[in-house]
Amino acid sequence: MSAGAADAARSAALAPPRAHGAPAAEAVLRACIEDFVVEEDLGFAAAGAGAHLLLKVRKVGANTPWVARELARLVRCRPQEVGYAGLKDRRAVATQWFSVPRPRTPLDLRSVRGEGFEVLEAHAHNRKLPRGALAGNRFAVRLRAAEGAGAWLAERLAPRVAAIAARGVPNYFGPQRFGRDGANLDPGAGNLARLPAAERGFRLSAARSVVFNAVLAARVGDGSWERLFAGDLANLDGRGSIFAVESADETLAARCARLEIHPTGPLWGAGEPRTGAGVLALEGRIGAGFATECALCAAAGMVQERRSLRLRVAELECVAEPDAVVLRFRLTRGSFATAVLRELVKDPAVSE
């Protein structure tokens, strides 16, 4: 890949093309913290017994690691003994689950409130909550319109909402993955081994994500992000199961059209992706344009993994208010609400 092509691929990864065309309307996103509400769905219930407590916590304007440290202080455990399934946006009203070791002395955690958070429920559980142990997230996002224009905005968005419900959206990693101004991709960061573990993890995650976004951007550009080809690795919707596509027959095409299965893209690691034919050629060419990022992932011991190129947006609805609309939807774990919102509206105060 030439230097110019590599620069274009990087730009596309950080400000990727939309699949459904230009935004259907302008609207203000996150005029206040309460405009963005997310609720974590673990997909399982507390065990009811065990050496840990599973805590349902509502946080407002607080980040997940800070709440975890506060919970550790309250129950007098080490911060690394607190478990949570995933990070939630600071600029949001977020309900998520944490686990803590059961305190040695009785403590009614259901009455605990701290700066920016409160514990809503506490249940006995048998183990620490591991990262990634959730089914998905439910969102309620208010999009602000001009005074009295809520009904107009809802009508304007209706065809796009229907298209997204039927076809899904590109499963891009959101800009928060790359840090402010792409800081997590800074090539001058020095030896990763010398960085604190958390910062090292952010940089490796960003390196993987930018390569994935570049591959997905290329497939959005040629219209193949929602189609299967020979050589693809496909996955079952909402699950980690992956299978090779030897020939894209009518049965697979029909299942893909129903959003039951999706093409995948690379989460880079050592070696080459396990795709074939033209898919492997595309991924190899783009990987070569991100040689530094790919080398970082391989050197860190990461293996080649896959992520769906397409995101099914479940339970999607758009409800008009006098001066806004509220979008409600559900996404599988590891996906970003920004992938949905950017296909619908453009915030005039936000540049890409």
Image (cartoon, helix red, strand yellow):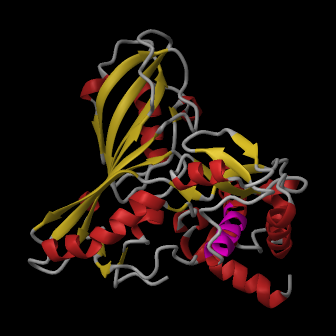
- Percent across and percent down for residue 326 are 23, 61
Residue drawn at x 52%, y 55% is 311
Residue closest to the eye, 261 or 22: 261
Residue range of the region highlighted in magenta in the rendering: 209-220
Q: Can I make out residue 24 in this image?
A: yes
How many marks overall?
Answer: 0
Q: Is residue 42 left or right of residue 286?
A: left
Which of the pair 345/351 is nearer the observer?
345
Q: Position of residue 351 (x, y in %)?
A: 45, 84
- Frontmost residue, 49 versus 277: 277
- Judged by its main secondary structure, the magenta piece is helix
**Picture coordinates of residue 83, whole percent (x, y):** 53, 32
The residue lying at 80 percent from left, 70 percent from top is 282
Lateral position of residue 350 relative to residue 143, left or right: right
The structure residue drawn at horizontal position 57% and vertical position 52%, both measured from the top left corner, is 254
Q: Quadrant of the N terminus?
A: bottom right
Residue closer to the observer: 60 or 257: 257
Residue placed farthest to the top in the image?
49
Q: Quadrant of residue 15?
A: bottom right
At 40% from the left edge and 29% from the top edge, which residue is drawn? 74
Question: Quarter of the image holding residue 97?
Answer: top left
Does the magenta-highlighted stretch encompass residue 268?
A: no
User: Could one spot residue 196 in this view of the protein?
Assistant: no
Q: Residue furthest right?
A: 271
Residue 23 percent across, percent down from the top left:
39, 79
Q: Is residue 191 above or below residue 15?
A: above
Instruction: Name the residue at the bottom extreme.
Output: 4
